[in-house]
Image: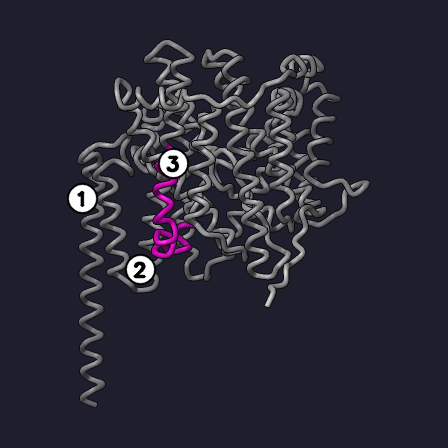
Amino acid sequence: MKTKTVHYPWYKKEDTDAFFALFQNNLANFVIIAVTMLGLGFPASIVFGKVIPGAAVAVIFGNLYYAYMANRLAQKEKRTDVTALSYGISTPVMFVFLFGVLAPAKAITGDPELAWKIAVGAAFLSGLIEAVISFSGNWVRDHLPRAAMLGALAGVAFTFIAGEMLFNTFAIPVVGLVSLVIIILGVIGKVVMPFKIPASLFAVVIGTVLAFTLGYQSPSTFQEGLAHIGFYPFLPSLVAFEGISYLFGALIGLLAVILPITLYNAIETMNNVDAMAAEGDSYDVRESQAVDGVGTMLGAIFGGLFPTTVYIAAVGSKWMGAGRGYSILNAVVFAIAAMTGLIAALAAIIPLAAVAPILVFVGMSLVVSSFQSNEKKYFPAVTIAMLPYLANYVMTRFNNNAGEVVAGISEGIVPLGQGAMFTGIILGAITVYIIDKKYYHAMSFAFIGAFLSFIGLMHAPKLAINAAPDFSIAYIIIALFLYYYGWKQAKISTVQDVTKKVA
């Protein structure tokens, strides 16, 4: 008997808002990459001729594959309301690769081109590691409490996405605040914009017009942007393998940065896929992690040096009612924008304050979803899993000077922020299992926390043996406490069972 095929549309009107949200999210990252690399002394030929096209290849591949996955899920479950996973460069990981891999490589070698090759090799290796990690993706998700995973993810959304972008929104209130209210009116309030223009597009247009009209953007930015227009072809090369040779030689110390941030990236994808499952679209974690890994490696072969991930923006897209069309359109537009230099032009013309409110909405969506998709009793676990990212945000913004800057505030900020994703999940899981009175399960996560602290994945600046002894000891003591209460609970249960049998 032939299975009936569901008519899952290639594109629908709801995809338009979601497209602009995803495109602008990626565009903001591309702008940061370009500005930062030029500021670090990398020539425009590498930035716009190699890095941007390579990163675009990774984005194109992932978006098209996730559109394919969405159609497969729609046909499998006979639904037309499936939303494709959002995908792009991981923002926190991007900063780590910029300042933890690329900048040190340039400082050590003194050669921008060689530093770029080393960073490309690091990205390829990171993608390979995540592809290998993907084999255990579903197992990890099944053994981690949802409140812990979503809470840690909400921490990223609250600080780096909604919080950071809200700061940018209020930097130019006459642009950002107006754009933010337009987003709230159109997306949350369901108010139809003039001429039925998508709210996100309308917000960017109005914000940009206000910026130029009131003098916050200079007309010269048009000339600056147009100067970058040209032809930048996608050209594969073997520089990634040349770069890897240095990572296992003179620059082996960079591996201590690559491994933990790759584990973080794999967990970020796992959490974001889980967030979508909570919204009704259940994708395979292992396949998603593998796609991210392959996309990162493919981007590196074309000159890109930033790992990719499933975005939390997928939740916002789901709320918008998007399907697969926004993902396909994002791939097409990025292909054109990267090859023509349009990304650089748009980056110069559109003010960040006009784009930031869209990302504020994306961050809000995930924080709300993290609570809504869990029972009320788990709210404390979601909350405590979010908190380490407050410290991580402070650390990241002060970079290597974090210890000096925040020492007068609290000595706990830096170690709490180091490995914040792992810390959030560990604390959240312990809290979940204490709420459920599963003390042995909580004990297991305390021991995991001790191990991660011991090797430097949490509460330490780098991988090392006995990297954070105070924290390792603290988690071991916690584990012993939890073991005692688990033993006590088991003893009480045994007595109760014996009493029932006697009665």
Q: Tell me where the magenta segment starts and ends, as one range.
A: 126-150
User: Badge 1: how crowded within 10 Å, few (<14), some, or many (20+)?
Assistant: some
Cα–Cα gap, marks 1 and 3? 21 Å
Badge 3 is on which residue? 391
Amino acid tagged 2: Ile
Q: Is residue 437 magenta?
A: no
Mark 2 and mark 3: Cα distance apart in space: 24 Å
Q: Position of residue 335 (x, y in %)?
A: 61, 29
Where residue 434 is drawn, which disc sits there?
2
Q: Is residue 48 left or right of residue 332?
A: left
Q: Is residue 475 above or below residue 214?
A: below
Query: Disc 1 and disc 2: Cα gap in Å?
Result: 20 Å
Farthest-out residue, front: 1
Q: Locate residue 243 relative to residue 165 in the image: left or right.
A: left
Residue 218 to residue 258: above or below: above
Picture residue at 45% right of the left edge, 33% below the top: 296
